[in-house]
Image: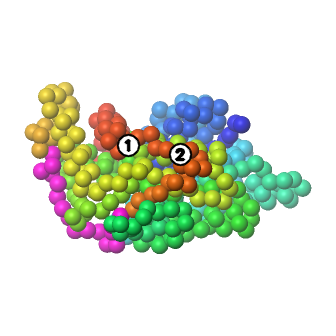
Amino acid sequence: MKKTLLVTGGAGFIGANFVHYWLKKNTQDRVIVLDALTYAGNKASLDTVADNSNFEFVHGDICDTPLVETLLSEKGIDTIVHFAAESHVDRSITGPDAFIETNIIGTYSLLKAAKKIWIDVPKANGHDPLVHRFHHVSTDEVYGELGPSDPAFTEETAYAPNSPYSASKAASDHLVRAYHHTYGLEVTTSNCSNNYGPYHFPEKLIPLVITSILFDKPLPVYGDGQQIRDWLFVEDHARGIELVLSNGRLGENYNIGGHNEWANIDIVKLVCKLLNDKFQNNDELAAKYPLAKSAIENRAESLITFVQDRAGHDWRYAIDATKTNNELGYKPVESFETGIHKTIEWYLDSTDWWEELL
């Protein structure tokens, strides 16, 4: 059945990749992106779909409830996929206000608008609720921190957020759940592990390492670099959300993970090695990135610089996606080794996208 999706935060990293994926896989559907274009939103991430007749971009804020109501009503939107969020943990520590406003108040605004247009207005006119779905995209960080031998997070793991970012996402998760149980809004939620891939804002670990090597800048690593994350290629995340939208049970949470636990320092060293290898005997690449002196000389690892650990830095996250695997047939396509190769290639080929963001 043809859908009309409102994708919030669709100019951000994961949102933009989802839009590309959805328009490619579901050619009959319409996709409307709502994005405020804050620091991590980049409309250029959507340039390749801008001429698609099924795509529309709206510059606006999810906290603007009347705007959301108008879009839902006038565009005939039946599905919200909610990515819009402030997501950088470091920024949440130094400036939590934006995280409370966007992640909590913004989610509440969307829920209010969805309830009004999809449930309340039809009911007032003597009709059943409109066919709808509100899918909320969340994070594994709401579950807290794992020790070295602790089992991975499941959907039954109690919430224990440790940063203002993860606390704001936990609050938004609870609001979505409450709107389902209290008002009958048809919702699903997915909690993902660390994403990586194209269109990733350069302040995040993997693109920061790649772009820093290309300019021969230090590679900052928090503490001893032994923090462990489960890494998920962003297109695998989009594929998982598609399965939740198609077959997920209403009111349920689904973990989407990459089954790729890596220590941060090992990722940094791997990217160093792969870029060293790229530059060896490649005069064309060396000419394109003449400042990448250490990589050209096969010593990018010498750029690694250990810095003071950030406040409240969780040591390990890991996702157990058994429920999503068993119920929905989800399985990541990319291993970390294949995904990181694709990611490095994209950054080497997409200087025009990321260089102006540095």
Q: Tell me where residue 195 appears, x and y as whole percent.
A: 41, 50
Q: Which mark is residue 74?
A: none
Q: Residue at x 63, y 63 (%)?
A: 176
Q: Residue furthest right?
A: 126
Question: How many numbered circles are shown?
Answer: 2
- Relative to residue 164, is residue 36 depicted above or below? above
SS type, badge 2: loop
- The answer to whether marks 2 and 1 mark residues whose Cβ atoms lie closer than 8 Å is no
Q: Residue at x 18, y 50 (%)?
A: 217
Name the one closer to the observer, 72 or 139.
Answer: 139
User: Disc 2 and disc 1: Cα gap in Å?
Assistant: 14 Å
Disc with the residue nearer the chain's start (2 vs 1): 2
Residue 102 in view here: no
- In the rendered view, does 189 fall on the left or right side of 150? right
Q: Which mark is residue 330?
A: 2
Q: Residues within 10 Å of mark 2 (few under 14, many from 20)?
A: many
Whether the magenta-drawn stretch holds residue 314 is answered as yes
SS type, badge 1: loop
Say what amino acid the circle numbered 2 marks. Tyr
State the image quarter where residue 274 is shown.
top left
- Relative to residue 46, is residue 325 depicted above or below? below
Region in magenta? 300-316
Q: Tell me where residue 4 appears, x and y as whole percent.
A: 67, 41
Q: Residue at x 31, y 38 (%)?
A: 341
Task: Point out the image quarter for the N terminus.
Answer: top right
Say what amino acid the circle numbered 1 marks. Ser
Q: Report which residue position mark 1 lands on.
A: 335
Q: Residue at x 35, y 54 (%)?
A: 261
- Relative to residue 289, is residue 70 depicted above or below? below
State the image quarter where residue 88 is shown.
bottom left
